[in-house]
Amino acid sequence: MSLADLYLRDVRGRMRGVKALGNGALTQLREEEWHLALSGEGNSAAVLIQHLSGNMHSRWGAFQHGFTAGAEGETAGRDRDREFTEGQQTPAQLLALWDEGWQVFLEALDNFKPDDLTAELTIRSEQHTILEAIQRQVAHYSGHVYQLVFLVKTLRGREFRSLSILRGGSAAFNAEMMRKPR
């Protein structure tokens, strides 16, 4: 298996894990909290979802069925500033937007071939290889999902259901991992 094959397999799995982490946070929001920011300059869960979905559609929509030479990673119709404006969507509408954006991104990842990683595209006229564009978005999407987790954890306080190893549970977790067959 080539390094490119290994990379694609890894990034596909890791980004599905990032989405699952976000899903775990979103399921803990109460209806009245979706549009709540922690500060005047902060983003609500709704705004984070709007932005992530808008970015995913813009960056990856042209690649859902594989590499397309000459595709621009910033679609002309995108209104990025509007993504940061609070709306009135219901939790169901926001979850649909979240899932649609991730579907676009994950389908693009699933359809890239190892040889595509060195192909080039532009994002706002800046040249990137597909590999660089993926890495750029891995950092971007992960950052926003962790913002979402922090937001929900702050809102839930002691009621927050951990999405990771519980505090004080590392030794037990490690022991369990060592018992699993390799």
Image (cartoon, rainbow, N blue to C red):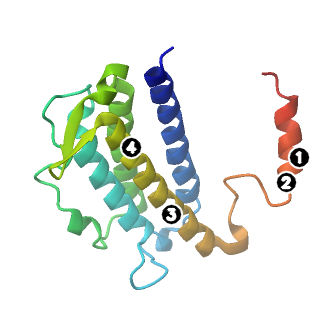
Q: Earlier in the sequence, mark 3 or mark 1?
A: 3
Disc number for residue 3: none
Q: Earlier in the sequence, mark 2 or mark 4?
A: 4
Amino acid residing under circle 3:
Leu
- 67 or 87, which is in the foreground? 67
- 6 or 20, which is in the foreground? 6
Q: Earlier in the sequence, mark 3 or mark 4?
A: 4
Question: Gap between marks 2 and 3, in whole Å?
Answer: 23 Å
Circle 2 residue: 169
Amino acid residing under circle 2:
Gly
Circle 1 residue: 172
Question: Gap between marks 3 and 1, in whole Å?
Answer: 28 Å
Residue 147, given in percent of the width and then of the height, sits at 50, 65
Circle 3 residue: 148
Disc number for residue 102: 4
Taking the image as shown, residue 4 lies to the left or right of residue 74, namely right
Amino acid residing under circle 1:
Ala
Q: Residues within 10 Å of mark 4 (few under 14, many from 20)?
A: many
Q: Earlier in the sequence, mark 2 or mark 3?
A: 3
